[in-house]
Image (cartoon, grey):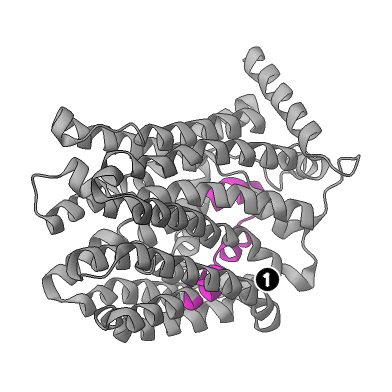
Amino acid sequence: MANAQLGSTRIEHDARLINTSHGDDHLRPGDIAIGVIIGRTSEFFDFFVYAIASVLVFPALVFPYLDRVSGTLWSFALFPLAFIARPIGTQIFMRVDRRHGRGAKLTLALFLLGTATVSMAFLPGYAAIGTWSAVMLAALRIAQGIALGGAWDGLASLLALNAPADRRGWYAMVPQLGAPLGLIVASGLFAYFLGALDSADFMSWGWRYPFFVAFALNVVALFARLRMVVAPEYVKLFESRELTPSRVTATIKAQWRNIIIGAFAPLASFALFHMVTVFPLSWIALYTTEDLTRFLWIEVGAAACGVVAIVISGLLADRIGRRSLLAYTAAAIAAYSGFAPQLLELGNAGEVVFMVLGFILLGLAFGQSSGAVASNFPKRARYTGAALTSDLAWLFGAGFAPLAALLLAANWGVIASGLYLLSGAAGTLIALYFNKELGRRLD
């Protein structure tokens, strides 16, 4: 334990030396925001590289003995393993946090995340090792989930606590910028290799390169985040029990109601998350003759619109309140679910409208989803409670979205895929309606 603590101290010291630019350790909200954005972008990049490959690569590489639709469904069946494993990772790494410090926790978690993602680049296909290819992919996906559970650093909570009272909505949206930024980088890389190589070269080696980028991004993110978590302000919050890692089982026992409500409050945005990222790519690949490279570039452009919408969500939340914005956007997402999937059948123009409109709604809703987490817990349980709530929200809202949407679409047409999205919107509205305490705190 002493060696681990010494290693953590050295890592924290190096991170502070590399990242300190003002000659002191003082951190303003803007400083924290930069670290949060870098960290979240890295995490979401790892996430989207796998998600895109689960459509373009894994069905043919791992499940070539199935038809294209069945192969994609099996690929999507492995997708939620990371979300199922994520709470387990939270419990494991909270123990590491308590015993060895935040530096050791983040270093181990991000090293595991980067290693699991990069290892996928070396995945042998079914032709080489048979069904063991699927087993290896599943194991690496579980490792990603465990690592993501450990990558929770409390920086979003720190940012919210340090934000001015009249700009909490603005700072709540900052962590969410990492999602569209990570998607832009991942989609852009895949679009480049898919467009520049013939199909044989892409399936042989081209698809592997985006996975190699993950480790480098994780190293940059590690140092950016370590500089934050060793700052005096962050340490002070730990000491005052504002962001202390409490025991997972005790937190669940005492805060189970807040955890459940907090997990369902952002459900609409989390369900929409995969409905405009992973699912449409699978539909275009399976049921149309559209150029996938072109669609990936549409995704890049739509994600840029999502960045703008997330920023706007911060302005709106400070004006009308986060709870109101979550409710309005959930209602809008419910309406979107009733007609938007059909746009994917209308060619290039319909795809653009579906993606841009979807990302605008996603940005407005997802931009405030982190604000619906930490403020619902007392000080003693805030750090662990927020982590568990985030884990469950991703599991219920996003983990099964690609599989459920494609199953519905394959059996009853693309319009049926909106049913999953509608259920997420209903979950958000019900959570906001029944939890008056949550509503008062969010406003």
Q: Residue at x 21, y 37 (%)?
A: 134
Asked which secondary structure carries label 1, the reply is: helix
In the rendered structure, does residue 381 fall within the stretch colored magenta?
yes
Quadrant for the N terminus, please. Answer: top right
Magenta-highlighted residues: 360-388
- In the figure, 220 relative to 359: above or below? above
Decide if residue 50 is in sight here.
Answer: yes
Decide if residue 274 is in sight here.
Answer: no
Front position in the image: 191 or 227: 191
What's under tag 1, amino acid-wise? Gly
Q: Position of residue 402 (x, y in %)?
A: 29, 61
- In the figure, 309 relative to 195: above or below? below
Front position in the image: 411 or 264: 411
Quadrant for the C terminus, please. Answer: bottom right
The residue indicated by pointer 1 is: 169
Circle 1 residues within 10 Å: few <14, some 14–19, many ≥20: many
Q: Residue at x 14, y 33 (%)?
A: 127
Q: Position of residue 270 (x, y in %)?
A: 43, 65
Q: Is residue 304 left or right of residue 31?
A: left
Q: Position of residue 162 (x, y in %)?
A: 78, 57
Q: Residue at x 25, y 46 (%)?
A: 58
Q: Position of residue 111 (x, y in %)?
A: 52, 31
Which of the 4 quarters of the picture holds residue 219? top right
Q: Is residue 139 left or right of residue 217?
A: left
Which of the 4 quarters of the picture holds residue 416? bottom left
